[in-house]
Image (cartoon, rainbow, N blue to C red):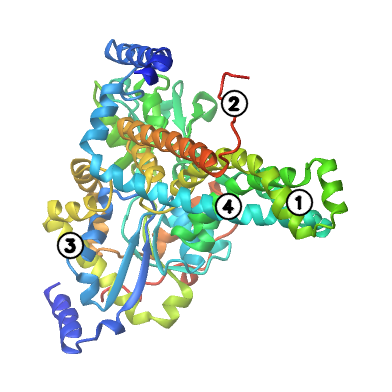
Amino acid sequence: MRWLGSRWKSIAFFLALLVLWQVAVDSGLLLRFIVPSPTDVIGEIIDRWNRLLLHAGYTLMIAVSGFVIALTVGVLMAVLIAHSRFLAESLYPLLVLSQVVPTIAIAPILSIWFGPGEVTKLIVVFLISVFPIVVNTTAGLLHVDEDLLYVARGLKASRWKIFALIRMPNALPNVFAAMRISITLAVIGAVVAEFVAGSVGLGYVVFTGAANVNTRLVFAAVVLLGVMGIALFTAVKGLQRLAMPWARVAKEGEA
Amino acid sequence: MRARTAIITALATGLSWPAAAQTDITFHLDFLVNGYHAPFYIAEANGLYEQAGLDVTINPGRGSTDAVATVASGNAQIGFADAGAVAQAVANGAPVTVVAVILQEAPYGIISYTEEGIDEPTDLEGHSLAVVPAGATTQALPAFFALNNVNTDEVEAITYNFGATVPSFLSGQVDATIGYLFGEFLAARNQADRDVQIMRFYDWGFDVYSNSLIVNNDFLADNPDAVRAFVAATIEGVEYAMANPEEAVQAAADNTETPFETLLEQFQVALPLIYNADAEANGIGSMDAEKWDRTQSVNVDYGEQAEMVPTDTLYTTEFLPQ
């Protein structure tokens, strides 16, 4: 009940939007084949639940695996960049390039090079989600309290010790902030990859629905993608609380 | 027909190829699964490919250009792609060859409400038309207009993204839309409150080939017998689908989110393009130099293709059943 107590306003706001949407479609204000009503979409999800779950599972698998690769490689790259000027100057241009080239434009080419399977999809997810991790982690590793470094060096701490005991803990909040951005980007990446190749995943379902002007199916897949995005975002927040129990981060709205 | 089945069966059983001797083939389609792909899926489901010594994986594609590129790069050995797109790619150096033409007629046209009276190409003058930014229909439109002396200044072409043309037509934003017989036309007809008709480019001078079986040239050189077996089994799939449409369409339905009823309708409207008068006279998949020349020349005259390709580098009838 306490949970509800703090949230009823948000829930009421959301429900009001849904009712408004339903009325707009049922009254004919919005054409049904352009915008299906919430009950249409829920019906579609129930009718196709088993198949949709299969597609959602695939998208989740691609998004999470690609994200884990991006996180691992991204943090590693950040460590290298923080410690080597040469690597910083050679890797950064490539990273920026990977970010400014629209993934949707190169995804079809990647699918021609690597085929329509999982390899292409993981590459797309990696390319779209690695950038925030590298940039944020590098910043966290470098922006360390100068006094702390001064003391550590005075005590003859090795570079490794400074990294493990000062830089990395200092960078953790940055890593998690980047993870929250990247996990949502990873879902986008998976959907983009499924648009351009293959025959499984929610991105493919959206594409199929659009090809047959079946907007119910499109919306059903979009709703599931939304739920997946929110769930993953929340999971990363939970992970942060587990990984950094010492940090009591202010809640949204408390600033 | 019976003789061919007998030969294939004799080959498959008589020589009793072990499973390891099966030739792996990835077959990349022109687009998402549609009713006209039912012959391929039934050939796969009923073991026609397997009996021919082939282990075939069918992958849905994302457009003919994508299919040609996937076969050219070797990520698929065989593909299904629009003849015009293939000719253009071959002119640009893509190492692929057409071995059979399945859709004998270009399957797109102008979709409009019957009551609007857009019955001839020039009737489009004074009307708005939804078009898409790329693809076979976009390439064919200038040729269709030129062949029929349509004053293009009088046609208000509005570009919509893929998937948005039918909703804009149904909601009255445009008077007509460009589209495929087994795609946009069916979608519009089934959701409209009035009669909808299609004016096919093919019936107005744009009589060119469409979706064809293409093979990677290296694969073709190394595996001529496998390609011959693939073409034969595919044509057998077409014949089977003609005799058993519902069973064939169900095989396709098992591989897509598109409902069975939609796929069946798509197959039914596509069949007259697969088994037209030419196919009836010369066999399913058959092709001739004259129509290939026409297919290429509209590409060169009105499209993006730089020059005609010598026909022997573009296609061969050598792999069709004799």
Looking at the rendered structure, the kind of residue marked 1 is: Pro
Nearest to the observer: residue B208 or residue B261: B261
- Mark 4 nearby-residue class (10 Å; few <14, some 14–19, many ≥20): many
Task: Nearest to the eye among marks 4 and 1: give it.
Answer: 4
Marks 3, 4: nearer the viewer: 4
- State the residue position of label 4: A70
Q: Is residue A79 left or right of residue B315?
A: right
**Distance in Å between CA atoms under marks 2 and 1:** 35 Å
Mark-to-mark CA distance, 3 and 2: 69 Å
- Mark 1 chain: A
Tag 2 or tag 4, which sits nearer the N-term? 4
| Protein chain holding label 3 | B
Q: CA distance from mark 4 to mark 1?
A: 17 Å
Among the two numbered marks 4 and 1 on one chain, the one whose residue lies closer to the N terminus: 4
- Camera-near label (3 vs 2) is 2
The residue that mark 1 highlights is: A93
Query: On the picture, is B157 further left or further right than A1?
Result: right
Q: Between marks 4 and 2, how big is the CA–CA gap?
A: 27 Å
Q: Quadrant of the N terminus of chain B?
A: bottom left
The residue shown at (42%, 60%) is: B292
Q: What separation in Å lies between label 3 and label 4 (alpha carbons)?
A: 49 Å
Task: Give coordinates of residue B109: x percent, y percent.
Answer: 37, 38
Camera-near label (2 vs 1) is: 2
Residue A204: percent from the left, percent from the top?
38, 45
Q: Amino acid at mark 2?
A: Ala
Residue occupied by mark 2:
A250
